[in-house]
Amino acid sequence: MQASGRYLAVTPTDSAWLDKGNSEATLFRLVPSHQEKGWGDDLAINDSIKLESINYKGYKVQCINYPLETSYHLVLSVTGSIFSIKPHCYKRSTLNPQYILGGNVIMLSSLKIDGYVSVKGSFVNDKLPDEFKWSHNEVGLRRWRQGFFKVLPFSGNTFFQLEKTTHIWTGNPFVFGEECRIKHLPTQQYISVKDTSDGLKVCLIQQL
């Protein structure tokens, strides 16, 4: 969940809860709900899916209602409920698809130099050690000869997320002149300018 930084978790014996990500109960597979799409097909907006548990094979997430409650609970069952994939911006249907929205994942490229803003020494495939979270990590430009290779960088070091400073979770479009934060996806830290004895330096810090 974006707002809490936690993950949906559910087991065959417990209703769903939000976990810090340490439990295997947070792992799911998106599976098609009907025969029109199969494994390996691209996932698109408004596709119907089921959430299949990785750790508990054969079980899928299902919504159930208790008679004395007005809300539904998420549990695991053999059948599972059908969900529809929706964009997180409530205005998305009326927007130009080229707009940059709050929460979009981006790469920042230089126009004069073949390169992308990159973080040195991030851990893309591993859990981030606590000591790394509090260090000031170097942010620089990673040279990338796009004209020669004809491909974009695939390293997570170059993946960032644009966050709004107000109404963060609405996913509304950005406008020129608007304030923003830039979060590095693998480390979940923010680009920051630090005043040092050697002058101003760009680094990563954990948002306080």
Image (spheres, rainbow, N blue to C red):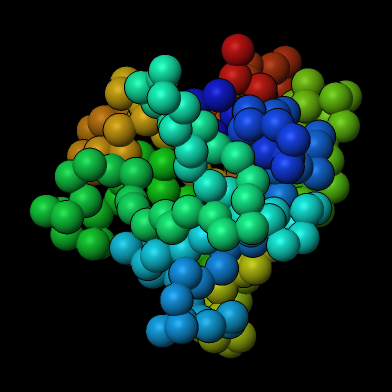
Residue farthest toward the left in the current orientation of the protein: 94
Residue 2: x %, y % from top left: 51, 33
Image quadrant holding the N terminus, namely top right
User: Which quadrant of the structure image shows residue 131?
Assistant: top right
Residue 170: x %, y % from top left: 30, 33
Please tell me which residue is depicted at 80% across the width and 37% down the height of the picture: 23
Label count reads 0
Q: Is residue 135 visible?
A: no
Q: Is residue 110 left or right of residue 148?
A: left
Please tell me which residue is depicted at 52% across the width and 60% down the height of the picture: 50
Please tell me which residue is depicted at 41% across the width and 19% down the height of the picture: 69
Camera-nearest residue between 139 and 154: 154
Q: Is residue 159 left or right of residue 123?
A: left
When the figure is inspected, residue 34 is found, relative to residue 64, above or below; the finding is: below
Please tell me which residue is depicted at 73% across the width and 42% down the height of the picture: 12
Camera-nearest residue between 180 and 138: 180
When the figure is inspected, residue 5 is found, relative to residue 161, above or below; the finding is: above
Residue 56: x %, y % from top left: 78, 53
When the figure is inspected, residue 170 is found, relative to residue 70, above or below; the finding is: below
User: Which quadrant of the structure image shows residue 98?
Assistant: bottom left
Residue 6: x %, y % from top left: 63, 30
Image quadrant holding the C terminus, namely top right
User: Which quadrant of the structure image shows residue 29?
Assistant: bottom right
Q: Is residue 37 visible?
A: yes
Residue farthest toward the top in the current orientation of the protein: 208
Q: Is residue 41 left or right of residue 165?
A: right
Camera-nearest residue between 180 and 139: 180
Residue farthest toward the front in the current orientation of the protein: 67
